[in-house]
Image (spheres, helix red, strand yellow):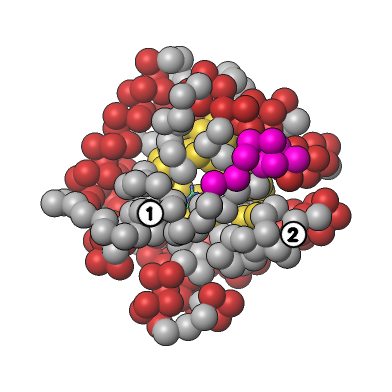
Amino acid sequence: MGVLNVTPDSFSDGGRYIDFGSAVARGVAMLAAGAAVIDVGGESTRPGADPVAGSEELRRVVPVIRELAAQGALVSIDSSKPEVIAAAIAAGAKMVNDVYALRMPGALEAVSSEVAVCLMHMQGEPRSMQKSPHYEDVVAEVGEFLAARLAACEAIGITRDRLLIDPGFGFGKTLQHNLELLRGLRQLTLQGLPILVGLSRKSMLGTLTGRAVDARLAGSLALAYAALEGGARMIRTHDVAETCDVVKVWSALRQCEGMA
Ligand code: 9MG
């Protein structure tokens, strides 16, 4: 899954794809590099980010989604607002990536029957989530939250075959929480749903390596490999070509294991 932030303030690529032409070109380039899905977002969810009005989010994302979908791309909408989710689906999005896991009033109802949904765990909200995250057992608590959101989806008719889950690395988590989640990822596969992870260039890599956001490729690829080993089946990334190489290497080794 390639990240396409049509925002002025995202932590890694904020401001680079804010106009229609550069956003579409970036989406097309990520498809050519091997992305299966383009995740289009119009509101930054980085720690400390200010909320954006729905009308502004719509203005940013809808034309880009319409154009990429018209070119045959499988587009995901990265949003939590019911009006944005509904408009994105009408414009051709086939997946909803919601960091609030459809908890906003009206969000469950906004998801129509033909789209997939990624339910992500977050403790708190982007503006304040990194102030003092706390868990007794992060892996168990994330698993319980995702199981409850899965039940809420099923209760409204969103069937399991359309769902993915995501532990939400960096969303209300310390470095230690993120590491424990990555080590314990396999436990989340017990939910029986595919796991999506977003680790690309995140601040945990800044802490671990001391590197600036645009120098975290090696760390991101190491985390992507670890996530695949832990059972992840979709990787959300800014660096599509390099991440596809990791997936190819991991797949080859896995097949080889199966033959032994
Ligand atoms: C929008 N967004 C930013 N980080 C993310 C992550 O880790 N997972 C998902 N699903 N979405 C994310």
Say which quadrant the C terminus sits in.
Answer: bottom left
On the image, the x and y values in percent for residue 82 come to 57, 27
What residue is pinned by disc 1?
Answer: 128
- Viewer-proximal residue, 171 or 251? 171
Q: Quadrant of residue 159?
A: top left
Report how many numbered discs are placed on residues in the image. 2
Taking 144 as reference, is 130 above or below it?
Answer: below
Whichever of labels 1 and 2 marks the residue nearer the N terminus, that label is: 2
Is 163 placed left or right of 6 in the picture?
A: left
- Viewer-proximal residue, 251 or 127? 127
Q: Quadrant of residue 47?
A: bottom left
Residue 250 in sight: no
Q: Quadrant of residue 52?
A: top right
- For the magenta stretch, what is the residue range? 51-59
Three-letter amino acid code of the residue under disc 2: Tyr
Magenta span includes 55: yes
What residue is pinned by disc 2?
Answer: 17
On the image, the x and y values in percent for residue 28 come to 78, 54
Three-letter amino acid code of the residue under disc 1: Ser
Is 90 placed left or right of 158 in the picture?
A: right
Q: Which of the two marks, 1 or 2, is nearer to us in this view?
A: 1
- Of helix, strand and loop, which one carries label 1? loop
Magenta span includes 215: no
How crowded pointer 2 is (Cα within 10 Å; few <14, some 14-19, many 20+) is rated as some
In the rendered image, the residue lying farthest to the left is: 136
Query: Is mark 1 in CB contact (under 8 Å) with mark 2?
Result: no
* Secondary structure that dominates the magenta span: helix
Residue at screen point 33% across, 23% down? 151
